[in-house]
Image (cartoon, rainbow, N blue to C red):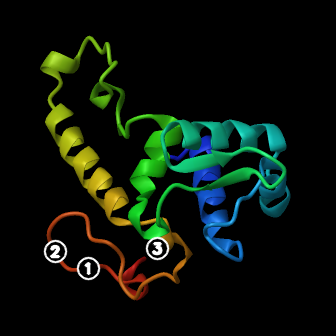
Amino acid sequence: MIRMSKFADYGLVLMTQFLRASSAEENLSARELASQTRLPLPMVSKVLKALTREGLLVSHRGASGGYSLSRSPAKISVAEVLTAVEGPIAMTECLDSTSVCKQESVCPVRTNWERINFAVQDVLDAISLADMLEPLPDHLVTLGVGETETPSHRQ
């Protein structure tokens, strides 16, 4: 099963919380975000630090300090958020630049995994933080060639 980690999921939850605030420019503290999202404060702090380190959030000090988005939510992709908290997107270990797989040079499916990885990366790049709060579109994103699958056509 391919599954996103809690850390990555929490990164997206926290980033979208800035859009739910009265103003996307509003500073939100780690404590406020933890309360609003019902996530553990230590985990929230850890995720916020990673997002700040990667330039997606700006940290503000002082009495009215906290965190704010570094740019418009429409200009922050889901891929950027996931990469900020988890590192590069890699569907298999051999696609990670730090891989040490002994089978890599003779693997018969590695190039197909690369193709899948690029498709997933492209989709995540195409979805912005602002898109994450929009209702589900009439059609789903298509990976590859063919008709777009609609929810009514899924089995």
Q: Which mark is residue 146?
A: 2
Frontmost residue, 35 versus 9 = 35
Name the residue at 42% across, 66% down.
128
Quadrant holding the C terminus: bottom left
Q: Mark 2 falls on what kind of element?
A: loop
Residue at 48% across / 47% down in the picture? 82
Residue 114 spot, x, y in % from top left? 21, 40
Residue sitting at x 56%, y 75%: 133
Q: Which mark is residue 107?
A: none
Residue 105 located left or right of residue 16: left
In front here: 127 or 103?
127
Residue 105 sits above or below residue 74 on the image: above
Describe residue 108's horizontal placement relative to residue 126 as left or right: left
Count of picture labels: 3
Look at mark 1 in the image and give the residue it sits on: 148
Eye-nearest disc, 3 or 2: 3
Three-letter code for the amino acid on which mark 1 is drawn:
Thr
* Residue that lies at the very extreme toward the front in this rendered image: 62
User: Taking the image as drawn, is residue 109 in sight?
Assistant: no
- Asked which secondary structure carries label 1, the reply is loop
**Residue type at the position of mark 2:** Gly
Gap between marks 3 and 2 measured at Cα: 24 Å
- Mark 1 or mark 3, which is nearer to you? 3
Q: Is residue 63 left or right of residue 4?
A: right
Q: Label 1: few (<14), some or many (≥20) within 10 Å?
A: some
Where residue 95 sits, quadrant-wise, is top left
Report how far apart the C-alphas of labels 1 and 2 lie in the structure: 7 Å
- Amino acid on which the number 3 mark rests in the picture: Asp
Image coordinates of residue 103 in percent, x first then y, are 23, 16
- Please give the residue where the numbered disc 3 appears in the rendered image: 131
